[in-house]
Image: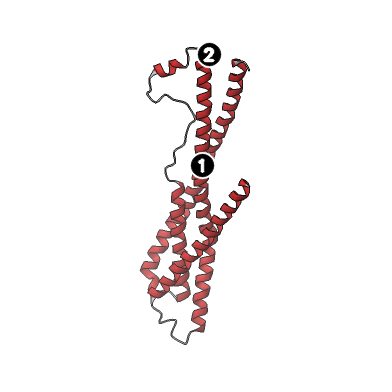
Amino acid sequence: MSNEVTRERLAEIKTEFQRLIEFHEASFREIDAKAKYWLTLSLPTFITLAGYLYKSGAQLELPLLVSGYALATILFIATFLLSYVLGSRRVESGILKPTSNEFSDVGYYLKTNETWCEYLDDQTAETLRAAGHNETQNNIKSRWLRLGEVSLLRGAPTAVCVGGGGAFAYTAASPSGLAAATPALAGAAAGIAIGGATAAVFVAISHFRTLSREKHKAA
């Protein structure tokens, strides 16, 4: 195969890899935008709810107290997970660049057709490496976003229903005056436990589903 044909084919391959890098860059931006959107909902709501519970929690009825702390716990966990999406992730450009930043290193590739073909080989390899790196980082960001969304969208209503419903059932089943005498600290602890357990269940389900899909693709 002639050098000219080889250069043309390498150029086509590099173009395809570069399109993959551009796809991952766009995906990065979309994931970050979604995470920021959910954070603008979860973080202020958590701060407001936590402040209200701290100030007025002792005056709330048991079902409201438990469900309130359960919701606050879910919001905290979701905010924590979503914050990892926005963590610093290096995006590779796929551009081959001499480590010394000296023109002499670039000039080496311009000497002969053989060295130019060597450059094309190295450039294509660098683009492929960058595409693989960006795909890995993209999968990590997607995983954190998915866990945050699962905690927020499924965990929040579930925790509120379980916490409020369980506390209401306890109040109805308890002897007269016993539920009203339950310390606020115990109600808060119950709400936090329910919220944490609910988030853990949904996160675990999402995690194992992801592992199952990855194993299925690998097979």
Q: Label 1 to label 2, Cα distance in Å?
A: 35 Å
Tell me the element at label 1: helix
Residue 42 image position (x, y, % from top left): 46, 56
Q: How is the image coloured?
A: secondary structure
Image mark for residue 171: none
Observer-nearest residue: 155 or 57? 155
The structure residue drawn at horizontal position 51% and vertical position 83%, both measured from the top left corner, is 173
Name above or below for residue 63 compared with residue 140.
below
Residue 165 image position (x, y, % from top left): 53, 74
Tell me the element at label 2: helix
Image mark for residue 136: 1
The structure residue drawn at horizontal position 43% and vertical position 67%, both measured from the top left corner, is 192
Direction from residue 210 to residue 82 in the image, left or right: left
Badge 2 amino acid: Asn
Name above or below for residue 89 compared with residue 187.
above
| Callout in the foreground (1, 2) | 2
Q: Please rate how many residues cluster around mark 1, counting C-alpha atoms within 10 Å: few if below 14, some from 14 to 19, many from 20.
A: few
Observer-nearest residue: 21 or 67? 21
**In terms of sequence position, does the residue under pointer 1 or pointer 2 come before the other?**
2
Q: Are marks 1 and 2 in contact (CB under 8 Å)?
A: no
The quarter holding residue 178 reads: bottom left
The structure residue drawn at horizontal position 62% and vertical position 15%, both measured from the top left corner, is 2
Direction from residue 162 to residue 108 in the image, left or right: left
Give the position of the N terminus as an image quadrant: top right
Residue 137 image position (x, y, % from top left): 49, 42
- Residue under pointer 2: 113
Badge 1 amino acid: Thr
Observer-nearest residue: 212 or 181? 212
Observer-nearest residue: 191 or 201? 201
Outermost residue, bottom side: 176
